Image (tube, rainbow, N blue to C red):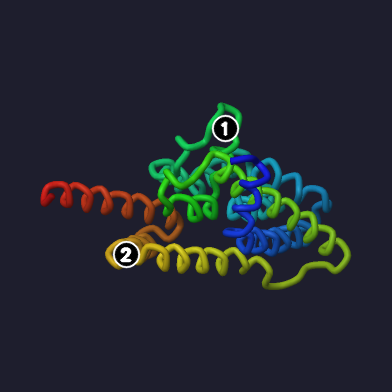
Amino acid sequence: MSAAVAVRSAAREVGVVWLGLVALGTGFGVVVTGYGFPWWLAPLISLTVFAGSVEFILVGMLAGGASIAAIALTTFVVNSRHLFYGLTFPLHRVEGRLPRAYSVFALIDEAYALTAGKDPAMLSSGRILATQAGLHLSWVGGSLLGALAGSLLGDVEGLDFVLTALFVVLALDAYDERPDRVTLLLATGAAGLAFLVAPGSMVLVAMSVFAATLLIRHRRGRQHA
């Protein structure tokens, strides 16, 4: 599959998510300038960090004068869920060292949701990379637009909620494609338990519990097979 064909294929299927990231990136850009940072910092962070939730947290910590150690620890805890993504993300379908390195860098929540639920045999290297590059460019472009708008209009309340709304839509879409009630209940239970036990590290605890329940379920399934 040529690069042009891969991009067109990805645009037809996930273009609406790219637009969602533009809106989300716009919210991030507004937040950056709202903290008093220069407009160019928003697209720079989006281009080099490319981790939506961490970027929102990072800007707040930078504005508050947090130490590098605190920023590094927080980034690790929030992004630790990506360790689990690697278990099922079709990285083996990406050809070439540099493209594979970029795919690892660009493995965000949306990229995982849009590819991990599909049959890996149906995904080409170009298709995976086009999806991730589209997400990356959409995020950077949105951040630039938001930063420019924020520098002119000031802070706009509510735009940061786009992140939550986008995750809800992706979760509903993933369930619609593979309606597995048991997995849904396990994920919901893991999230609820993590919220009650460790609200400060909810994502890490929830993903750990969820991964453990999936492993137990998989072993029990093999025993009964």
Q: Position of residue 116 (x, y in %)?
A: 44, 50
Tell me the quadrant of the picture where the N terminus can be found: top right
Q: Amino acid at mark 1?
A: Ala
Q: Is residue 138 above or below residue 96?
A: below
Query: Which residue matches tag 2?
Result: 180
Instruction: Please tell me which residue is depicted at 26% across the width and 53% down the height of the picture.
Output: 213
Secondary structure at badge 1 equals helix
Q: Is residue 195 above or below residue 208?
A: below
Secondary structure at badge 2 equals loop
Relative placement, left or right, of 173 versus 131 is left
Q: Position of residue 173 (x, y in %)?
A: 47, 66
Q: How many marks?
A: 2
Of residues 188 and 96, the one nearer the viewer is 96
Residue 101 — which label? 1
Q: Residues within 10 Å of mark 2 (few under 14, many from 20)?
A: few
Q: Position of residue 87 (x, y in %)?
A: 38, 42
Instruction: Please tell me which residue is depicted at 67% across the width and 55% down the height of the picture.
Output: 60
Relative placement, left or right, of 221 versus 196 is left
- Return the residue found at the far left: 224
Relative placement, left or right, of 28 versus 219 is right
Mark 1 vs mark 2, CA separation in Å = 32 Å
Instruction: Please tell me which residue is depicted at 44% across the width and 62% down the height of the picture.
Output: 174
Of residues 150 and 100, the one nearer the viewer is 100
- Return the residue found at the far bottom: 157
Disc 1 or 2, which lies upstream in sequence? 1
Relative placement, left or right, of 77 versus 135 is left
Q: Is residue 52 above or below residue 16?
A: above
Q: Amino acid at mark 2?
A: Asp
Q: Residues within 10 Å of mark 1 (few under 14, many from 20)?
A: few
Q: Position of residue 48 (x, y in %)?
A: 68, 41
